[in-house]
Amino acid sequence: MQRACRALSQIPSACPLQRGARPFSQALDEQTLRLCTIAGYAAKGNLTQLAKVWEELPEQEHANAHEIVMQNLLYNGLPKTIMALNAITKVGVKDRIIAEDRSVARPKDYFREQGNAAVKELFGYKQVRLQQRLRLLHPAYGQWVTDFGFGRVRSRPGPSQKVRALCELAALGGQFVPPQFRVAIIMTLTAGATLEEVRAVLDTVTDIWGSEQQAAIDSFWSDLTLRRVAERGWDFEKADEDLLRNNEGLHPQSILKEDWSHLFPPEALSPQNWRHPAISSIRPVIGLSDRTRMLALCATNTAHGNLSGLAQAWTYLDPMDHGAGLEVMLGTVLNTGFHRVHNGLLALHSQGVCRDAIQVDREDAILDGEGFTARGEIVLQQIHREKYHQFREQMERLHPDLWLWIVEFLYGQVTGRTCARLSLADRELASLGCMAGLANGSQLGAHMRGALNCGASPQAVRGILDQCGHAAGRPMQAFVDGYWLSFVRTIPSKELAGAR
């Protein structure tokens, strides 16, 4: 094993890409390789290549491959998942797994128990530390990862935890964050994958994400110490007593504290007393406050993984608005998945979060509550209005379980959260800030219309779009501007005064 580790660490980043050219490219069986490729293209949003791979996929593999596309929701959000499901549905889906039957009564904590079991299987003796750390970022976020991420999605029938973990590595190649990537690798090893299989998946990054991402991952791999990991992973049976004892609590250098002392009193946080450069450089909009703009800018930076931009924007928020800011951060789960939100929450805690923004007892009561489906339906009807039933039919056609995830979790538990200082219109404008960087016209238009349906003015929608280039870049700003010109034709001219 030590010889294999040394060989793996010496793989050059400039090796050819063809299968068979690298030392461990044959470690993966053909079916797992196809699933990893599908995961990568779905995560990137490369629908053309995804459709080509799906066309050549044996029909007996459709059910497992469909599960991998559904799992994309966890690390890339709903928009890209819908895009990918639409792409493969057009090609033709011969088989899929329907795992959730509403007619079958389940215990209230069913998905939580499933999630705890999956986390224990994948994280071994790190389970307690991981779940504690997630909770201290935000109680709701921590529970969502366990209940929904691991309990409802990762525990579904079909691909094994090992295959799901390998596919996640292929999908994460485009949002490479070293600490999380290392965790994902060790999780994959703990699930039963070999170092050779992990390296074989990483070798697919160039074909999917490009040579720059491959070079970054190869450099990361060469610096990664894997000998001890390869021998033990996070397996309870292979861990000694010292390892188990040292993983009972948080790491001593963690900025998160078990007594919540990492949260600050309002008087200890001083926001900037001048306007954010991005806000100062664009035209003012009547009825669109700097506060709403900053919340949307936080969402846009989170969606693009721009953590320095997010930290800067956070310093311009009043501490009394930190609760609304955290709500916006949690809401980006809908559009970006869990990994971006995790990084964003960690960046905000590094910057300083007001202790009034997280009310732990209240959060625990909400998480143990019920009625999320009814709440989700109300929120979706407000956003889509007369097109609600059409939207529901479209999602159920893609997959009945996807609709349940949308109505119960994404809009019932996430978007449907109550916050006195954040309206549904504010949430939709923040979602619009996330969507502005995805270059998907139909979904961007749906969120524009949703913001209008929730009470935002056309001028406010245009104002949020004007600032997306600050985080997403000029090409994306040009795309948004072009799409806006076609969208405004659907709005009565009397409503558009000052919005063009």
Image (spheres, grey):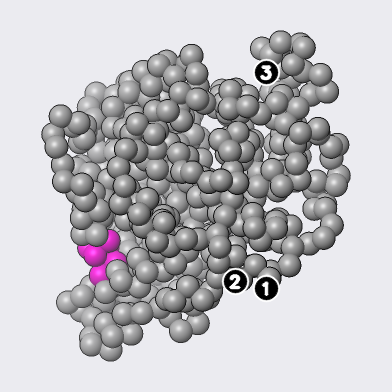
Q: Position of residue 495 (x, y in %)?
A: 74, 16
**Highlighted magenta segment, given as a residue range:** 118-124
- Residue 311 image-quadrant placement: bottom right
Q: Which residue is found at the position 49% from the left and 34% from the top?
A: 79
Count of marks overlaid on the render: 3
Across and down, in percent, residue 298 comes to: 64, 50
* Quarter of the picture holding the C terminus: top right
Quarter containing the N terminus: bottom left
Mark 1: few/some/many CA within 10 Å (<14, 14-19, 20+): few
Residue 387: within the magenta?
no
Tell me the distance, in whole angstroms, between the alpha carbons under discs 3 and 1. 45 Å
On the question of residue 54 being in view, the answer is no
Label 3 packing within 10 angstroms: few (<14), some (14-19), many (20+): some
Q: Which residue is mark 3?
A: 487
Residue 264 has which mark?
Answer: 2
- Residue type at tag 1: Ala
Lower position in the chain sequence, tag 3 or tag 1: 1
Q: Amino acid at mark 2?
A: Phe
Label 2 element class: strand
Q: Residue at x 56, y 62 (%)?
A: 356
Relative image position of residue 125 (x, y in whole percent): 26, 74
Q: Nearer the viewer, mark 3 or mark 1?
A: 1
498 vs 267, nearest the viewer: 267
Inter-mark Cα distance, 2 to 1? 6 Å
Up the image or down, 252 lies above or below 408; here it is below
Badge 1 element? helix
Asked if residue 485 can be seen in this view, the reply is yes
Circles 2 and 1, Cβ within 8 Å, touching? The answer is yes
| Amino acid type, callout 3 | Phe
Which residue does the image show at 71% across and 61% down from the upper left?
A: 315
Estimate the x, y position of residue 440 in percent, counting from the top left.
58, 29
**Residue at image mark 1:** 268
